[in-house]
Image (cartoon, grey):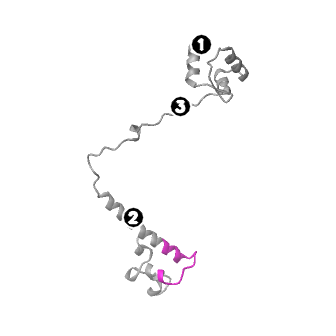
Amino acid sequence: MSRHALWPTGADAAPTNGASQARTAAPTAQHVAHSRPLPAGSALAAQVKLARLADLHSQLAQTYRELSEIPLPLGREEALMSDVEKPTTPARLMSVRDVAQRLSLSEKTVRRLRRRGELPAGIEIAGTIRWRPEELDAWIGGQR
């Protein structure tokens, strides 16, 4: 949308409601920029903002066209995200509660089985017992 579509001037301006053509011709953006400030909610202020937005849009479109005509360098291989080596995050250690839920047992029974040596030993960190999921899966697989 151009400024001319928003503000018809000269021969494009048509008088409305019997008004003269000089009164209906909208001011140019330069004229409005140098005149007194417009009321915030006025239709003219909205038209000025739309005209400025239209100008910026056309400038942006021109820049996109210019950028699209720039050839990209050939022979350079771009790495795909799937090719990038991802750091492996170790699996979350399982708590007594997690193991109890996994085995459908109470937490008290899990602690008792561990003390008896009937469960994998797990890892004790600051008085808290944790299990690696793969160790527990291997233990479950061996129980069958």
Q: What's the CA distance linking mark 3 and mark 2?
A: 47 Å
Q: Are marks 3 and 2 in contact (CB under 8 Å)?
A: no
Which residue: 55% across, 23% down?
A: 134
Label annotation for residue 90? 3
Residue type at numbered disc 2: Leu
Magenta span of residues? 33-49
> In front: mark 1 or mark 3?
3
User: Where residue 115 sits: x, y (%)?
Assistant: 69, 17
User: Where residue 71 sits: x, y (%)?
Assistant: 27, 55
Label annotation for residue 60? 2
Q: Is residue 11 left or right of residue 44?
A: left
> To which residue does mark 1 refer?
143
Quadrant of the rendering where the C terminus is positioned: top right
Describe the element under mark 1 as helix, strand or loop: helix
- Say above or below: 142 vs 20: above
User: Where residue 54 sits: x, y (%)?
Assistant: 43, 69
Residue 93: name its quadrant: top right
Describe the element under mark 3 as helix, strand or loop: loop
Residue 28 shows up from this direction: no
Q: Is residue 76 left or right of residue 10?
A: left
